[in-house]
Image (cartoon, helix red, strand yellow):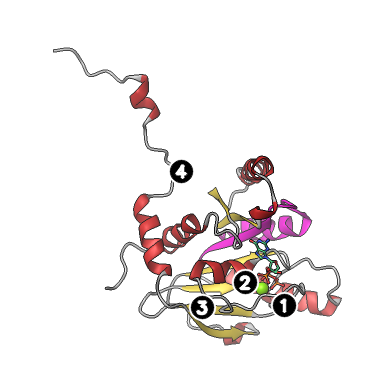
Amino acid sequence: MLPPTVSPADAISEPDPLALPAEAVELGEALFARPWEFLKTVPSLEWLPDADRPEIAFAGRSNVGKSSLINALTRRQGLARTSNTPGRTQDLNFFLVPQVPLFLVDMPGYGFADAPKAKVDAWTKFVKEYLRGRRTLKRVFLLIDSRHGIKAPDREIIALLNECAVSFLGVLTKLDKLNAYDQAKVIASVTEVLRTEPAAFPRVGATSSETRQGLPELRAEVIVAAEITTLPF
Ligand SMILES: Nc1nc2c(ncn2[C@@H]2O[C@H](COP(=O)(O)OP(=O)(O)OP(=O)(O)O)[C@@H](O)[C@H]2O)c(=O)[nH]1
Ligand SMILES: [Mg+2]
């Protein structure tokens, strides 16, 4: 009998190790079809809820679209407070869904020029302590405005995440503001920059809360990051 041969067609259809697993996409849709709720606002470390379940935090520059993305993912407008005024979210805000062991955390934005220095220092200290010390923090979704790409304040947070070995996923926001060519360009360039960052997860999210582009994939990233394999009933 002749030995089995691999044709070029078979080689092309090899599964991509970086692709999102199909079951995660399905579970992600099921998770976010559920009624997400606001749990609490946390102004300082002593107010954190017990670290008794996986947690995913949404971080990024002020106005990048963190709160909007949480609303879009959960399909609940107004769940997280959004604003045109940079610096709207000033505390950590926790969200949960009944019966599923998971917190989503909306973080205050960094890097907005008009904030008083004392306020920026207090925020920086609080956030650094949270990122460093929260042992149930499974992944940070690091949001990057697709019109601007990775800027100096993002690099500072990336350095911190690398230093404390907190895994993060780069997530482009506001892609509706770019044409298809510029979208592809920024996705490629951010992927390339993050490829060499030790704590960066080897995929990049590409989203718009406006057009809902990339939301099924990001819901699946929540499933992957929280290591959810099944949902209770
Ligand atoms: N076109 C477009 N606008 C968006 C998108 N996401 C957010 N925005 C707008 O960007 C502004 C800031 O959105 P937020 O969600 O409040 O941003 P944030 O990152 O939570 O801001 P801070 O809490 O201040 O750090 C709002 O005017 C949103 O309507 C998007 O995907 N597309
Ligand atoms: Mg916000």
Q: Which residue is mark 3?
A: 95
Q: Is residue 156 magenta?
A: yes
Estimate how packed mark 1 is, as few (under 14), some (14 to 19) or many (20 or more) residues with alpha carbons within 10 Å.
Answer: some
Question: Which-is-in-front pick, marks 2 and 4?
Answer: 2
Sequence order check: which comes first, mark 3 or mark 1?
1
Residue 137 visible: no
Q: Position of residue 86 (x, y in %)?
A: 76, 72
Mark 3 and mark 4: Cα distance apart in space: 28 Å
Occupied quadrant, residue 70: bottom right
Q: At x 39% / y 80%, what residue is drawn? A: 98
Please, which residue is most extreme toward the top here? Answer: 2
Q: Position of residue 199 (x, y in %)?
A: 58, 53
Mark 2 and mark 1: Cα distance apart in space: 9 Å
Q: At x 36% / y 58%, what residue is drawn? A: 26
Q: Which residue is mark 1?
A: 88
- What's under tag 1, amino acid-wise? Arg
Question: Which-is-in-front pick, marks 2 and 3?
Answer: 2
- What's under tag 4, amino acid-wise? Leu
Q: Which residue is mark 2?
A: 67
Q: Which residue is mark 4?
A: 18
Mark 2 and mark 3: Cα distance apart in space: 11 Å
Callout 4: SS = loop
Sequence order check: which comes first, mark 2 or mark 1?
2
Q: Is residue 118 magenta?
A: no
Sequence order check: which comes first, mark 3 or mark 4?
4
